[in-house]
């Protein structure tokens, strides 16, 4: 009977050691998974930052485009005004030449 108890204790000890080794392996695997998740989170954060930068650049380019359009429109109107003034000046000069 003592021999049976010793065998049972020995067997239980072996199983406990195997369980401990298995848990150690699981811990290592979980740590590796955690590192991968951290890397993915960092990469996602960096991608979001780049997307924000691109979005801001697109907005700025759109603003510049709008400003350029406004400048072109003002220049076009100024050119029309100059043509009208040129016509008026030409008519005034004709009046003095008569």
Image (cartoon, rainbow, N blue to C red):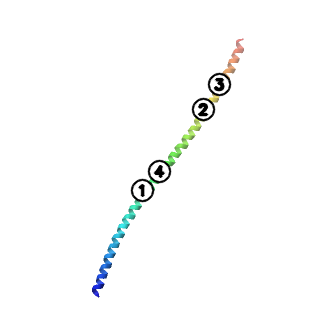
- The mark nearer the N terminus, 3 or 4, is 4
Above or below for 87 versus 2: above
> Answer yes or no: do the residues labelled 3 and 4 have beta carbons within 8 Å?
no
Disc 3: which residue: 82
Label 2 sits on residue:
72
Gap in Å between the C-alphas at discs 3 and 4? Answer: 52 Å
Q: Tell me the residue that label 4 is attached to.
A: 47
Query: What residue is at 68 percent from the left and 20 percent from the top?
Result: 87
Which of the 4 quarters of the picture holds residue 15? bottom left
What residue sits right under mark 1 in the picture? 39
The answer to whether mark 4 and mark 2 are in CB contact below 8 A is no
| Residue found at x 46% / y 54% | 44
Task: Work out whether mark 4 precedes mark 2 in sequence or the reverse, and give the earlier one.
Answer: 4
Image quadrant in which the C terminus is located: top right
Corner quadrant of residue 79:
top right
Residue 3 in the image: above or below residue 61: below
For discs 3 and 2, the disc positioned in front in the rendered view:
2
Mark sitting earlier along the chain (3/1):
1
């Amino acid at each position: 009977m003592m021999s049976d108890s010793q065998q049972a204790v020995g067997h239980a000890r072996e199983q406990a050691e195997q369980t401990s080794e298995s848990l150690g392996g699981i811990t290592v695997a979980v740590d590796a998974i955690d590192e991968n998740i951290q890397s993915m989170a960092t990469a996602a954060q960096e991608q979001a930052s780049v997307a924000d930068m691109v979005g801001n650049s697109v907005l700025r380019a759109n603003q510049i485009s709008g400003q350029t359009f406004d400048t072109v429109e003002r220049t076009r109107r100024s050119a029309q005004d100059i043509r009208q003034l040129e016509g008026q000046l030409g008519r005034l000069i004709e009046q003095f030449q008569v």
